Amino acid sequence: MTPRLYEDILEEIEQIGIFKYGGLPHWGKNRNLAFDGVINKYKNAGKFLKVKQVYDSQGLFSSEWTDQILGLQHGVTVAKEGCAFEGLCICLHDSHCAPIKGYFCRPG
């Protein structure tokens, strides 16, 4: 088994900063999980979405990912086997990690 300790520590810090302390994710660096409901953390989100609709009514500057982040489509998290390793979900069930490799859902 390859040690994941350094990566695990970074992921734990990311989750603490964003979910426990209400931090904002870096739009170019964080994984999908960090963006779950992020649009609600911005007080002018509604105004931004109105301006976006005016200037990009055809969605030329949008993608499935940006629409998910902005709350215009279903959420950015995906619950599937191994999703926690990919940063697509919070580990709620052992299958979200890799129980075959000895990784289970446990509190940090």
Image: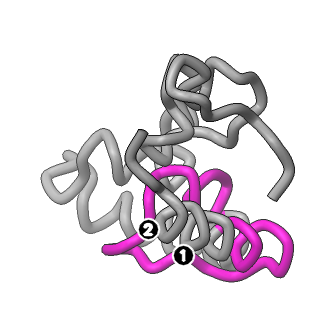
According to the image, label 2 marks what residue?
Answer: 30
| Residue 88 vs residue 59, the one in the foreground | 88
Q: Residue at x 75, y 35 (%)?
A: 105
Look at the numbered disc 2 and give the secondary structure of its residue.
loop
Q: x, y percentage for residue 28?
A: 31, 74
Of the residues shown, which amino acid type is indicated by label 2? Asn
Q: Residues within 10 Å of mark 2 (few under 14, many from 20)?
A: some
Res 96 → quadrant: top right
Q: Is residue 15 left or right of residue 79?
A: right
Q: Is residue 85 above or below residue 3?
A: above
Q: Is residue 57 left or right of residue 69?
A: left
Q: Residue at x 58, y 31 (%)?
A: 97
Residue 43 appears in the picture as rendered: no
Q: x, y percentage for residue 46?
A: 62, 67
- Look at the image and give the residue range highlighted in magenta: 15-39
According to the image, label 1 marks what residue?
Answer: 25
Look at the numbered disc 1 and give the secondary structure of its residue.
loop
Q: Residues within 10 Å of mark 1 (few under 14, many from 20)?
A: some
Residue 61 appears in the picture as rendered: yes
Q: Residue furthest left?
A: 60
- Residue 72 is a magenta residue: no
Q: x, y percentage for residue 61?
A: 18, 59
Q: Is residue 72 above or below residue 9?
A: above
Mark 2–mark 1 contact, CB under 8 Å? Answer: yes
